[in-house]
Image (spheres, rainbow, N blue to C red):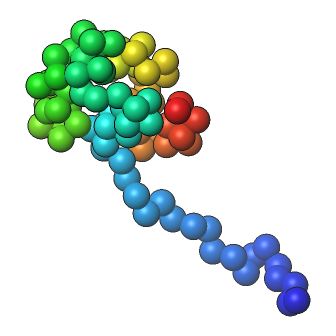
Amino acid sequence: MKKTAKNEFIPAKQHVVLTTGEVVKMLRELKGWTQEDLAKSCGINATNISLLENNRLDIGKKRALQLAIAFGVHPAIIMFPEYESEAIGKAA
């Protein structure tokens, strides 16, 4: 096997950027919840859950906090998925 020097490698680039809606949907599915289940857990109606998941409604601090409490995660994981992608995987 050929040995390689560390400087021969090019750092990997992030190829996937998650939206807030995708994070909400991913966390919900990882919990095995329907949109109705999540609505009951967080107090946001199912229609708005659908709109959030499809990026048709802005999350806002209040909704992010409601969802974070329901999922048991920090609100930053939901509001800033591009910075918190590692934590999203641990949240399930």
Residue 6 visible at all: yes
Out of 16 and 67, give the one closest to the viewer: 67
Q: Is residue 36 left or right of residue 29?
A: left
Where 92 sits versus 61, above or below? Answer: below
| Residue 20 picture location, percent across and down | 31, 37
Quadrant hosting residue 60: top left
Residue under the point 37% across and 37% down: 29
How many numbered callouts?
A: 0
Where 14 sits versus 40, above or below? Answer: below
Residue under the point 52% across and 32% down: 92
Residue under the point 43% across and 21% down: 71
Q: Is residue 12 left or right of residue 5?
A: left
Out of 23 and 62, give the one closest to the viewer: 23
| Residue 27 picture location, percent across and down | 41, 33
Q: Quadrant of the N terminus?
A: bottom right
Where 91 sits versus 19, above or below? Answer: above
| Residue 77 picture location, percent across and down | 45, 30
Where 11 sits versus 57, above or below? Answer: below
